[in-house]
Image: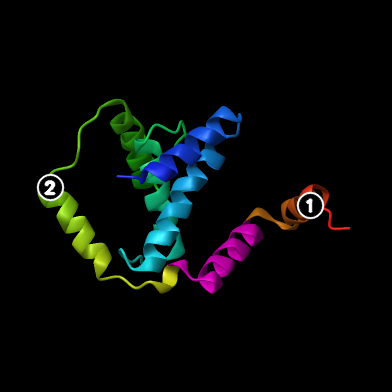
Amino acid sequence: MPEKQTLERARKRKREGKSASTQAGEFVREEMHHVREGKHGARSPEQAIAIGLSKARRAGVKLPPPNKGTTSTETRENAKRDLRKSRSRSRPANRRANATKAALKKEGHSAASRSALSRHSRAAARRRGHRNLSASARKAARTRARTT
């Protein structure tokens, strides 16, 4: 269950007219904090991000499943299931939830470290290509707060 603060922040983003991925970013952020503070672990930054996106979908963020070529069929099906779950208010069985929690507790906490996230974002940028990377750098420069 996402924290109240996270839900509020996501709703605020929605009111501001931000995209679904921006709203979902709040849940991913929460997940990174959970891993860092030792609430549970994650095997990789990708896993922590996936948990956050799943929480976002279940909380009602209208985040579409990933495209056909980008991920496995299983991942896409899970995303669709999460979207369906957001419409019903059913909770997972206690036994199942506890098993998931126990498995995540055994994982490490370095998946949410600055270096791991940096490595992940650089790899993701490389996959998108240099033009996209350059465009996002230009946008960052344009929208950066000016300090004079």
Q: Which residue is mark 2?
A: 94
Q: Residue at x 73, y 56 (%)?
A: 133
Labels in figure, total: 2
Label 2 and label 1: CA atoms lie apart by 47 Å
* Magenta-drawn stretch, dominant element (helix, strand or loop): helix
Question: Which quadrant of the structure image shows residue 47?
Answer: bottom left
Helix, strand or loop at mark 2: helix
Q: Which residue is mark 1?
A: 145
The picture places residue 109, in percent across and down from the top left corner, at 38, 71
Q: Residue type at mark 1?
A: Ala
Q: Residue type at mark 2?
A: Asn
Image side of residue 96 versus residue 60, left or right: left
Helix, strand or loop at mark 1: loop
The picture places residue 147, in percent across and down from the top left corner, at 84, 58
Q: Range of the magenta residues?
A: 112-127
- Position of residue 31 relative to residue 103, above or below, is above
Q: Residue at x 79, y 52 (%)?
A: 145
